[in-house]
């Protein structure tokens, strides 16, 4: 239920707030005082009409219309630089922009208002000007009879479909019942199947034993081949021992070679270091001379800094002397202008 409406810069309303009471509320006033504008501001929220800017006040400013409901929810229609709706629910604002001619679904679903909810004095009386058929359609829509009819039709169609399915299933049951007679031989066939299963088990057992015998034959053949190879290896044993001795001698020779190579590398490294140190010794004298020159340069720089300070002092004194002379000349000029020609103390004429 609407509790209040607040209108700003809408036609003749600059800042109007109307709080409604429970039951019937009547807005009275003289002609052109803004009674119809209240309904237009309400329609602006509900229907997003009127369009354009003709309803906005001539003095300018942001145009808003806000309705507040008894549950605290607010819906605001605003037009300024932006054209938008604002839904305030549970203290949270939700803004809808770029509206065009549409009303946001969240707004319309919350309002749940139709054209019959807002009537003006120039509108036709509610349902009186309608034909009996239009009145019946209106109440059918309110009572949702059309939905009931469509639901009944859907249920009847579903029932017919079920009846058709039941009839088809009965026919299928009879045909399946007749086909079951084809399987009357199954009880006698069960004994034959058991005999076949026993034969299959005995056959599988025989196949497994045959596979084991084949595996044993392969293992015996492999062992025989290995025995032949081992007999050849025993004949070649003296040659293998000589080869092992040669391998040991070769390893010892390689070890000696590696040790000699390490000694050679060490000697080369020592030679390189001696050469490097000789260059450093030659450069030592030059380095000492450079250090002596740097020390002389530091002393000269210290002298240069002290001379620069003395020069700055002289310049500062010269500047102070020039300023003092200038001030003395100014005082002399003032003295000549203001002091009289005759001394007031002794009466002597002053040239």
Image: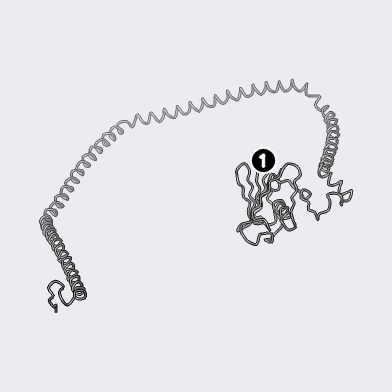
- How crowded is the residue under tag 1: few (<14 C-alpha within 10 Å), some, or many (20+)? few
Camera-nearest residue between 181 and 284: 284
Colour option used? one colour
Q: Horizontal placement of 125 versus 304: left or right?
A: right
Which quadrant would residue 249 be assigned to in this image? top left
Camera-nearest residue between 324 and 145: 324
Quadrant in the picture for the C terminus? bottom left
> Which residue matches tag 1?
71
Q: Residue furthest right?
A: 132
Q: Position of residue 46 (x, y in %)?
A: 71, 51
Quadrant in the picture for the N terminus? top right
Q: Residue at x 12, y 73 (%)?
A: 346
- Tell me if residue 64 can be seen: no
Q: Residue at x 58, y 25 (%)?
A: 210
Q: Position of residue 37 (x, y in %)?
A: 71, 55
Vertical position of residue 315 compared to residue 340: above or below? above
Q: Position of residue 54 (x, y in %)?
A: 69, 61
Q: Position of residue 127 (x, y in %)?
A: 85, 49
Q: Horizontal placement of 308 versus 145: left or right?
A: left
Q: Horizontal placement of 176 versus 269: left or right?
A: right
Q: Horizontal placement of 305 versus 249: left or right?
A: left
Count of numbered labels shown in the rendering: 1
Q: Residue at x 64, y 47 (%)?
A: 87
- Tell me if residue 14 can be seen: yes
Q: Residue furthest bottom?
A: 351
Which quadrant would residue 44 be assigned to in this image? bottom right
Camera-nearest residue between 143 and 278: 143
Q: Secondary structure at mark 1?
A: loop
Camera-nearest residue between 346 and 131: 346
């Amino acid at each position: 239920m609407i509790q209040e409406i607040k209108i700003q810069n809408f036609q003749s309303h600059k800042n109007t707030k109307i709080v409604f009471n429970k039951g019937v509320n009547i807005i009275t006033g003289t002609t052109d005082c803004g009674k119809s504008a209240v309904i237009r501001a309400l329609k602006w929220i509900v229907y997003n009409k009127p369009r354009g800017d003709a309803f906005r006040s001539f003095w300018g400013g942001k145009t808003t219309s806000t309705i507040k409901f008894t549950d605290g929810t607010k819906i605001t229609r605003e037009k300024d630089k932006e054209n938008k709706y604002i839904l305030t629910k549970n203290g949270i604002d939700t803004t809808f922009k770029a509206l065009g001619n549409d009303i946001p679904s969240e707004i319309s679903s919350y309002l749940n208002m139709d054209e019959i909810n807002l009537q003006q004095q120039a509108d036709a009386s509610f349902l009186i000007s309608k034909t009996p058929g239009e009145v019946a359609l209106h109440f059918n829509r309110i009572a949702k009879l059309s939905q009931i009819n469509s639901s009944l039709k859907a249920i009847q169609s579903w029932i017919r479909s079920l009846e058709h399915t039941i009839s088809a299933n009965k026919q299928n049951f009879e045909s399946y019942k007749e086909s079951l007679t084809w399987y009357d031989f199954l009880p006698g066939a069960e004994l034959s199947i058991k005999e076949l299963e026993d034969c299959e088990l005995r056959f599988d057992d025989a196949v497994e034993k045959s596979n084991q015998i084949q595996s044993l034959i392969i293992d015996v053949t492999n062992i025989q081949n290995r025995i032949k190879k081992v007999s050849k290896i025993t004949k070649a044993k003296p040659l293998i021992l000589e080869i092992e001795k040669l391998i040991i001698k070769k390893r010892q020779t390689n070890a000696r070679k590696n040790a000699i190579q390490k000694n050679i590398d060490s000697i080369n490294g020592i030679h390189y270091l001696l050469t490097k140190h000789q260059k450093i010794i030659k450069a030592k004298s030059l380095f000492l001379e450079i250090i002596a020159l740097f020390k002389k340069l530091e002393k000269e720089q210290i002298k240069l800094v002290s001379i620069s300070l003395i020069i700055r002092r002289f310049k500062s004194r010269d500047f102070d002397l020039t300023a003092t002379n200038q001030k003395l000349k100014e005082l002399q000029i003032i003295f000549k202008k203001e002091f009289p020609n005759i001394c007031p103390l002794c009466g002597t004429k002053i040239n």
